[in-house]
Amino acid sequence: MTATIEEVIMEACDLPAVPDVANKVMKLLADPNTSSAMVCRTISDDPALTARILKISNSAFYGCLRTINNLQSAIVIIGYSAIRSLVIAVSTKEVYKNFGLTERMLWEHSVGMGIASHILAKEAKISKVDDVFVCGLMHDIGKVIMNNSNSDLYNTVMERTYNEGISALEAEQDLFGFTHPEVGGLVIKKWNLTDELEKAVQFHHDLQKVAGEDKYILTLTSIINLADTICRRLGIGTKGPDEGIDVKGTEAAKTLGFTAAQLDELIPMIAKTYSEEKNIFE
Ligand SMILES: [Fe+2]
Ligand SMILES: [Fe+2]
């Protein structure tokens, strides 16, 4: 991204800061000397965050067999990496302010993408599934920020994509002069998340741009891109399902080496998991 685009975005959009507790927790988790008691104490400072983490830890999504009834156990049982992803997930939800129809759809798409990306990551045997979940959840955060910054203009973007059938990217470029993946990449950078996440968010609509990157970045970006195609096909956070969307022939499916038979199982699995788990953050 050129410095000028970055400046234009900073000027037009109010990029959210990562909430204070989340920032502290992320710093602690990055330090190998941190004990679970220290993490527990920091998260406990925020009762709403604590309640959310406990609720999500007990959801089928984390697949725990026994009930987790306190934060200390949650940290030990689901592990640092999952706790970190939950703290970021809860912080992401806070960016979705005034919940109107647009925010509702964007949020549904975001949760669906977190779930879909997580499922695809497991199928692709990626070890960092929690990271992939966060990436799926945050991939379109640029849209939310653009909508928060100028909701009238972003509504026009949405209308044009629905009525004229053009892509969100084209409408955004035309009306704002920049696009949601560019804004999203800047948020990831501001939140001090990884370079890999930043690239995957920035290029989730343009796999060509990561073709020369290392294998993990290519895989991560392909997972987000494929999950997005699947969510659009299933109508998760869009105006409705679109059976006409070809998932199997996509570049992303080829890069990940998913066969038609695998995708025939994965797509209904994503639809089912989404319908069962879509309220985990409520
Ligand atoms: Fe997108
Ligand atoms: Fe998307």
Image (cartoon, grey):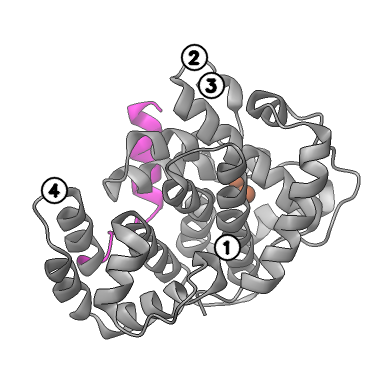
Give the Cα distance between marks 3 and 1. 26 Å
Give the Cα distance between marks 2 and 1. 29 Å
**Which residue is found at the position 42% from the left and 47% from the top?**
131
Task: In the rendered view, tell whether residue 2 sits above or below residue 63.
Answer: above
- Tell which tag, 3 or 4, sits nearer the viewer: 4
**Which residue is found at the position 55% from the left and 56% from the top?**
114
Give yes or no for residue 218 being in the magenta stretch.
no
Give the x, y percent position of residue 6: 36, 36
Looking at the rendered structure, the kind of residue marked 3 is: Lys
- Tell which tag, 2 or 4, sits nearer the viewer: 4
Numbered tag placed on residue 111 in the rendering: 1
Q: Earlier in the sequence, mark 2 or mark 1?
A: 1
Asked if labels 1 and 4 touch by Cβ distance under 8 angstroms, the answer is: no
The image quarter containing residue 36 is: bottom left
Q: Is residue 66 left or right of residue 41?
A: right
Looking at the rendered structure, the kind of residue marked 2 is: Gly
Give yes or no for residue 8 being in the magenta stretch.
yes
Q: Earlier in the sequence, mark 3 or mark 4?
A: 4
For mark 3, give the secondary structure: helix
Looking at the rendered structure, the kind of residue marked 4 is: Pro
Give the Cα distance between marks 3 and 4. 34 Å
The residue nearer to you, when weighing 132 against 193, is 132
Numbered tag placed on residue 32 in the rendering: 4
Determine which residue is flagged by label 2.
212
Residue range of the region highlighted in magenta in the rendering = 1-20
Q: Residue furthest top?
A: 212
Looking at the rendered structure, the kind of residue marked 1 is: Val
Numbered tag placed on residue 209 in the rendering: 3
Asked if labels 1 and 3 touch by Cβ distance under 8 angstroms, the answer is: no
